[in-house]
Amino acid sequence: MTLQIYNTLSREKEVFKPLEKGKVKMYVCGPTVYNFIHIGNARPIIVFDTVRRYLTYRGYDVQFVSNFTDVDDKLIRAAEELKLTVPEVADRFIGAYFDDVDRLNVAKASVNPRVTENMADIITFIEQLIEKGFAYESAGDVYFRSKKFEGYGKLSNQPMDELQHGIRVEANDRKEDQLDFTLWKNAKPGEINWESPWGKGRPGWHIECSALARKYLGDTIDIHAGGQDLIFPHHEDEIAQSEALTGKTFARYWMHNGFLNIDGEKMSKSLGNFITLHDVLKDHDPNVIRFFMLSVHYRRPISLSDATLEDAKNGLDRLKTAYQNIDYRIVNAEEDDVNELEHDDWLEQLTELKQQFEDEMDDDFNTANAITAFHELAKRANIYLTKEKVSIAVMREFLSMMRLFAEVLGLKLEESKSVGLDDGEIDELIEERQVAKNERNFDRADEIRDLLKEKGVILEDTAHGTRWKRG
């Protein structure tokens, strides 16, 4: 199957054809680093990391850029509240961002440009828009003439008159037209600022991504992605200012993920259900959070609740248990357990499941259906392990394919290390427990089981011996 992507701009699935053969230029809008990112921010981070992983799996060289907005009104307010400078606030929460997303197994971007480190490029971009007549200065501010760009509204599919309707008119507004948006903001007394041809100030939000995408990826990029809430005005404005400047298509494919709700309701501070990823990770396995985010197609809304997280945990546990059972059987296989003669049918089934997984991912990165294929793989592995004699080659192929699926989805199937016990110590305690059971000293056997459980080690007695995993 050919890879297809739903393009927000055309509102249909399109065959993916990158500008340059074998290479993909991808830009994902990053966070404004005034606080810990909220759990809704984690969805595009996980989704588009998975898109990148699959493109890499398909053989593309992916140049992946995601910015940090490290100066704006929110950072200025946070700096005042925390009694810090704006750069200090940004540094603190960029560090927190990396700590949190690393736990989600998110790969590092090719570049994470910061706005404050690219101010000259942003100012030059604005100057060139003014020269072309698409922007104008007004009392130290600079605005983009939205109506001058003929395609304005094409991404959000809104006619100009609908965009104009309902805009709040501000007293003493400096704009020529209410639809014009800010490229440069005149600094208020005491605010962080940079020198520019229009006086001291700082950039507006929308211009940042256009300037950074152009600097690091060129005039035209393959994929521009972000949350559904960014379609208008952020991405609409990016298209306008970028294409007005270059006369070229800014992004060939626009991808947007659906909203994340909390217990079925939109997340907002007013409802008291605003949750940071940092807090969620205190109580939940990051591997489960990632699995949960991928369990629904990225364009559909998803609802976070105790029940949906428990479902995700159970689903992931089934995959991990199947993986660990195969691994255990391979390691502990005895000569009389092995039959290498009849395995072609099973290898054929594995090939079919791999094709099913790829077909689902080729269909606009349908991770929900890809996970279904993953579960089918685990189910067949469990069926295979009920055989009295098994093929080491088949089991290794099961193991290899589960690792492949997990790598594409960014999931971890290996158990994390338990605190206080290494593998050798665990094996010794299990051996001691088996001796106690053989001697019918069941109190000691139970005592060892309970001790291991306290250390996060779960035992499972099987027909082929006792196996353990870290909980």
Image: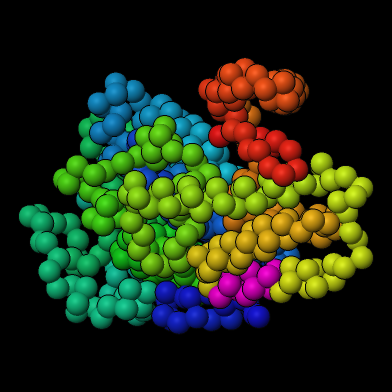
State which quadrant residue 134 falls in.
bottom left
| Left or right of 130 in this view: 269 | left
Task: Locate residue 364, reporting x and y percent.
Answer: 53, 73
Q: Give the range drawn in magenta.
A: 353-363
Q: In which quarter of the image is the N terminus?
A: bottom right
- Residue at the location (63% across, 38% down)? 460
In this orientation, which residue lies closer to the viewer: 428 or 324?
428
Relative depth, front residue between 88 and 226 = 226
Identify which residue, 226 or 316, lies in the foreground: 316
Foreground: 11 or 266?
266
Q: Which residue lies furthest to the front in this view?
A: 440
Q: In this view, does 300 lie above or below 307?
A: below
Residue 243 sits in quarter: bottom left
Residue lying at 34% horizontally and 46% vertically, measured from the top left: 306
Dominant secondary structure, magenta: helix
- All told, the count of numbered labels is 0
